[in-house]
Image: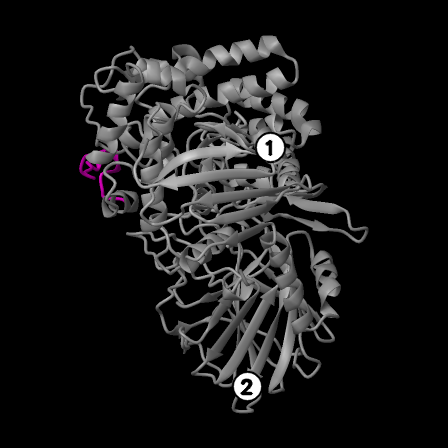
Amino acid sequence: MNITQIDTRLGTDSTFAFSNGNTLPLTGVPFAMNYLSVQTTPEETSWWFNPNAHTYCGIRLTHQPSPWIGDFQHFTMQAQTKLSAEPSDYDATKAHFAPHFLRIQDITQNVLTQACATTYGGCLQFSALNQEKLWFKLSAPKMQVIGTDASTLLVSFKNFADCEDPDFTMFTAFKLPTSATLDTLEIKDNTLYVALNCVACEIHFATSFISTTQASLNLKRIAADDFETLCNQSLQAWNEKFSIVEISDNNHKNVSTFYHNLYRALLYPTRFYELDEQQQPIHYNTKDKKVASGKLFTNNGFWDTYKTSFPLYSLLWPNQYAEFLEGFLNSYRETGFLPRWLSPDERGMMPGTMIDALIADACVKGIATDLMPEFLEAMIHGAETISDDPKYGREGLAEYLKLGYVPCDIHESVNKTLDYAYSDWLISVVANKLGKQDIAQKYQKRSQNYRNLFDKEHNLMHPKDRNGNFTSDYESITWGCGFTEGSAWQNSFAVYQDFPGLIELSGGNQKFAQTLHQLVNQDARYNVGSYNMTIHEMREMAAQPFGQLAISNQPSFHLPYLFALCQEPASTQLLVKQLLTTCFDDGFTGYPGDEDNGSMSSWYLFSSLGFYPVTPGLGQYVLGIPLFDKVVLHLANEQTLCLQTYNNYPSNNFVDYYRLDGQEITTTIKHEDLIKAKKLEVRLQVLPK
């Protein structure tokens, strides 16, 4: 698909109360340090863009991964012909929001603005349509002019949302036209106005978290290229990623939705390192408050992305995956713990240390093998060390080690227990690969701790007190009360390491399937529980006609595929097909819930290809149902994999057969077999076998 046809406003029509993605329309290059967007409100809020608004407050340089996290460094840029602190008007229907390019016509100021972004900066092109001279308006809280030199303006920003370093600073260098007046600059009401003294110009800019010298170096590397050149370079960067996947299908809407989701999957994590004069990677260590060598990445919550985003990178961009791991290992070296939620540094949000899944999944797939001995040490450290700072490590670890579960008086106790048990298994996976069988056996045994919270009366997980008693006020549709962003229905099946064991506990395949049928066939009711209010995830679950499935949030991503694991593949196929075709599109309301840093997009991408990584760390995919007639994947091992689907009609919701290079397969396929194969064939039919 042509990159210029991607509308980055996908999923942006969201509010605090209801999410259709909670995304932002970001322009830049894949996995960049900065992105550009449009700001439509002058208010200080994390919901600063509305796709239906007609107000325009400028081009925003942003680092915001989610409205729930906030923007740790930002500023807005606007050209004006008449100085004004009020928002302008723009016609959103005539604006162009593309991954590599922004075009906005400011109706109030009568200025055409075009913008593109590079990894560390970008370029703005302004044209006064009424031929009046332009002013450059720069707005941000905690902004300070550091200096000027000829046509260069140096500014610092300290508007972070949260950080280990209270003085964490972003430095920015602007190359203005030589006609600009820079001798009398003053910031008033968080705004700086610079007279450009021209009717059209280009402004280059670059940022740095290290120093003004580094910002100037980053600017120097792009300042000689004009707007068109930089825009084409950005376009080329996107095309390089997109060219890996070629789709042939008559349903153009589905194809468009796929590539829109591919765009979203290529945004996070973002780069947090820069290149010094010798082109060597350096970054700012916020913990020790100094510059350090090596790579670093940020803006990623592993609880969201370990299920889908990183398995996607392992398939399509394994070299990029290895680079991410190199950066995350530096986070461990600097803080003493593997990261949980980075933005810009540790936020300590969500249960579990789910980066363990990234490490083990890479290990079994042969990615970044040289890093695995140190990663194993880091994983074990997190599994055994009680941190003085609750942002790091496993919360409730002392109780988990003593009782074999996290008790109910500790927040999100069930999810923590299940995540820790899964991570214990992930440690055993890496230990086995490294030939450390004694370590593997210890953590393999500990991974069975999930059994301690299984309630056979309900066939669901149930919180326990410190004395080993199930709580008395349990109701399966009650949210919170031991569960994270859901109830027992969404969170009881997070036993990725041992689905055969969970099925056995449930009474076998038939009984387990009955529980899954009950999950999707009951009403989407909920009690607010310990949340004490209706949160947006509750509304989003209720808005979709799939009972308690809640594909709107990450805990449920694997649930449709569990039918296949208890010998009911037809239910998986029907559910996945219905979810793909009814819950997703390429518009402003394109998602059934928070997209979360590429995680929901990657669920769509995997599911539409016809297979899904239910258990990261196992190195296999569970088969579902493909959406397209033909997909060609150009893999990193120089292998071309063709995914061919026959009888692909809307009426055909079930699979007749799967064949990998002519050999029929059922239920699962190994990653190593998939990346070596030349052709995966699927035939669809009207009714299940």
Residue 409 is situated, as x and y percent measured from the top left of the image, at 30, 23
The residue segment tinted magenta is 522-535
Q: In this view, does 16 lie above or below 429?
A: below
Image quadrant in which you'd find residue 419 = top left
Mark 2 / mark 1, whichever is N-terminal: 2
Q: How far apart are marks 2 and 1 (CA)?
A: 50 Å
| 164 relative position to 461: left or right | right
Question: Viewed as shown, does residue 447 lie left or right of 135?
Answer: left
**Magenta stretch mostly in which secondary structure?**
loop
**Residue 615 in picture, x, y percent from top left:** 47, 28
Left or right position of 181 against 642: right
Residue 580, percent from left and from top:
37, 47
Identify the residue at horizontal 40%, vertical 74% (top origin): 93
Please state, as top left, top right, bottom left or bottom right, where the C terminus lies in the image.
Answer: top left
- Above-or-below relation of 366 to 39: above
Does the magenta run of residues contain 328? Answer: no
Q: Which residue is drawn at 60% across and 15% down?
A: 432
Q: Residues within 10 Å of mark 2 (few under 14, many from 20)?
A: many
Q: Which of 634 and 559 is in front in this view?
A: 634
Q: Quadrant of residue 134?
A: bottom right
Q: Mark yes or no: residue 160 visible.
A: no
Amino acid, disc 2: Ala
Check disc 2 and report the residue beneath it. Answer: 128
| Numbered disc total | 2
The amino acid beneath tag 1 is Thr
Q: Residue 561, relative to residue 225: is it above or below?
A: above
- Taking depth in this image into account, of 300 and 237 the one nearest to the observer is 237
**Residue under label 1:** 335
Identify which residue is drawn at 22% across, 42% down: 533
Could you tell me residue 165's position as x and y percent? 57, 44
